[in-house]
Each structure stands twice: as C-alpha cells, then as structure tokens.
Amino acid sequence: MLTKEALSQIAAGDRAAFTQLYLHAKPSLIRYAAALLAGDVDAAMDVVDEAFLNIWREAGRYTGDGSADGWIRRIVRNKAIDWLRSRRERPLPTDGDRGFAHRQADEADTPEATAEKTSAADELRRALARLSPQHREVVWLCYFEDRSLSEIAVIAGCPENTVKTRLFHARRLLRGQLERLQTN
C-alpha cells in the first residue's frame, strides 16, 4: 500500500487510507528505525509514530517523484536522526527482548546449540550497534531488507557511490569486530 495513490488519498484527508498504510507499513518501519537506533525498539516505535504524524500532516507535499516508500522511509530516517541527536546516541539496550537481531531458538536445538546461536546473534547485534548510524542504515537496508543500491541511495539521500563506500567500510568494521571476538 506504499503507493502514490495512497499518499494522494491521505493528503485529501482519507483516514481509511492512512489507517491501512499505518497497519501495513508500521512493522517494517519499526524494524528499520530500530536498526538506525542501535536496536532500541521502544525508541523506534516512538520515532515511527512521530513519522506517521508527519505523513498525515505532510502527505500533500509528496510530489510523486521517486517511490512513496522512499519518501516515507526518508521521514522515518530524519526522525531517527533527530532522536539520535537529541540523545547523543544512547548505548545499545541489553534487554534481549528488544534486540533486532534476536532469533527464536529452534525447538530441535540442544541447549548448547541454542546458547551458541543466541551468543552469535548477540555478538552481531553488539557489532552493528558499534557502527555509525550511517553505516548501520546501509547494512540494514542492504542485508536485512534486501534493498538495491539505488533504493538505499534514495532513502539515505546520498549518491549510490556513497552507499557503496559506506557498505564497504561497514563490512570491514564488522569483520574486524567479529574476528576480534573470535580470537578472544
């Protein structure tokens, strides 16, 4: 439902279109915002709600250039950046319920396998949290949302080559962090 028509309907005051967009898009936008906010799901929920308030108010400003999804994600991204600036980027929450990389254990797993999986997911979550917000964003969009480089460039508001550079550096930083953990 992330269509230009939906935004046109919302701009015209169509509450049903807004509700449908909200219900459809909110889960993925929360995951996206949580990635930008180092896994803080509570803050991500607040950021997404603020973004939807802006979408309701500003839908008429969408010009139709580019994808509606990109326009909406840009609003979420800007709200997340505002939140980070206001908090000076808080550390990653340690509560396992809120980690965006947390996985449910397979029922067939042994306790040892479950502990190993949880440990690996926690290590990855901590490594991602140590990245800058710009690096976390491109990693999330590329690997967790399977976005193309051109889509990421639109959402991040930067050239495609900048996205490539950020991905290169983010992968290098993640590899270094994870290698250090393995040698310890």
Image (tube, rainbow, N blue to C red):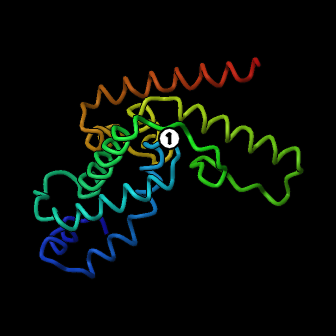
Picture quarter containing residue 36? top left
Q: Residue at x 74, y 39 (%)?
A: 119
The three-letter amino acid code for the residue at tag 1 is Ala
Report the residue at 38% width, 64% height from top. Answer: 25
In this picture, is 78 found above or below 106?
A: above
* Location of the C terminus (image quadrant): top right
Q: Which residue is mark 1?
A: 38
Q: Residue 51's quadrant in the figure?
A: bottom left
Q: Residue at x 13, y 52 (%)?
A: 65
| Quadrant in the rendering for residue 115 | top right
Residue placed at 27% from the left, 82% from the top?
16
Crowd rating for badge 1 (residues with CA inside 10 Å; few <14, some 14–19, many 20+): many
Residue 113 screen position, x and y as percent: 84, 45
Side (left or right) of 56 relative to 108: left
Number of labels in the image equals 1
Q: Position of residue 1 (x, y in %)?
A: 31, 69
Q: Nearer the viewer, residue 40 or 161?
A: 40
Q: Nearer the viewer, residue 97 or 72?
A: 97
Residue 123 horizontal/vertical position (percent): 67, 34
Residue 24 sits above or below residue 124 on the image? below
Instruction: State the SS at label 1.
Output: loop
Which residue lies most toward the front here? Answer: 87
Q: Position of residue 57 (x, y in %)?
A: 17, 66
User: Could you tell whether 107 is left or right of 155 in the image?
Assistant: right
Judged left or right of residue 160, residue 113 is right
The residue lying toward the viewer, choosing from 138 and 96, is: 96
Q: Is residue 56 left or right of residue 105?
A: left
